[in-house]
Amino acid sequence: MKVTPTAIAEVLVIEPKVFGDARGFFYESFNQKAFNQATGLNLNFVQDNHSRSAKGVLRGLHYQIQQSQGKLVRVVRGAVFDVAVDIRKGSATFGKWVGMELSEDNHKQLWIPAGFAHGFVVTSESAEFLYKTTDYYAPEHERCIAWNDPAIGIDWPVTTQPSLSAKDQHGRALREAETF
């Protein structure tokens, strides 16, 4: 696997070795030992999640203020623009974001450490999004930052208003949000 830091060094792009021919492809989507060795991290993942969304659905920017979750995310059908926002107050990159396309074709994964808000928008007709987390979902600790907060300035690849959940419609500005 190839590991590449993003503009925020703790957020990593993970590219598995893909073996393909005219019949299709094969790749090892996750191997704990290889992941830990390649990233230098020593993590345990405790939960896998799978979501399906239609084109234009935007989910996020989500995080848990307690039981914070590191996330290893990927797309197995379709494509999304995936975003991580640093919300660690003492960090030199506080309020900064990184984003990239994750798709069934590029097989890329993104490691998003605890202390970051996360979101994505579906850019294909639909997308199936999978992610592993380092802690369990705790709805009482979940928070949401507004996807379009101008203080963050995410350059989402959208031309119309995205489809948002009720929770995401009420996301807070970063300056008002509970952060790490």
Image (cartoon, rainbow, N blue to C red):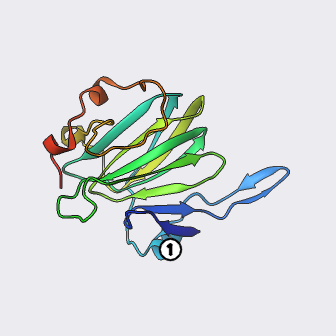
Q: How many numbered circles does the render carry?
A: 1
Percent from the top left, x then y, of residue 48? 44, 48
**Vertical placement of residue 60 versus 90, above or below:** above
Residue drawn at x 23%, y 64% is 91
**Vertical placement of residue 122 versus 136, above or below:** above
Q: Quadrant of residue 146?
A: top left
Q: Is residue 156 left or right of residue 152?
A: right
Residue drawn at x 16%, y 44% is 175
Percent from the top left, x then y, of residue 155? 42, 42
Disc 1: which residue: 38
Question: Looking at this view, is 35 or 108 the one in front?
Answer: 108
Q: Is residue 144 left or right of residue 26?
A: left
Percent from the top left, x then y, of residue 150? 28, 39
Residue drawn at x 31%, y 54% is 96
Residue drawn at x 52%, y 40% is 80
Q: How busy is the neighbourhood of tag 1: few (under 14 within 10 Å), some, or many (20 plus)? A: some
For label 1, the SS is helix
Q: Is residue 89 left or right of residue 98?
A: left
Give the amino acid at mark 1. Answer: Ala
**Vertical placement of residue 88 versus 39, above or below:** above
Q: Where the N terminus falls, by quadrant?
A: bottom right
Question: Looking at this view, is 106 or 52 the one in front?
Answer: 106
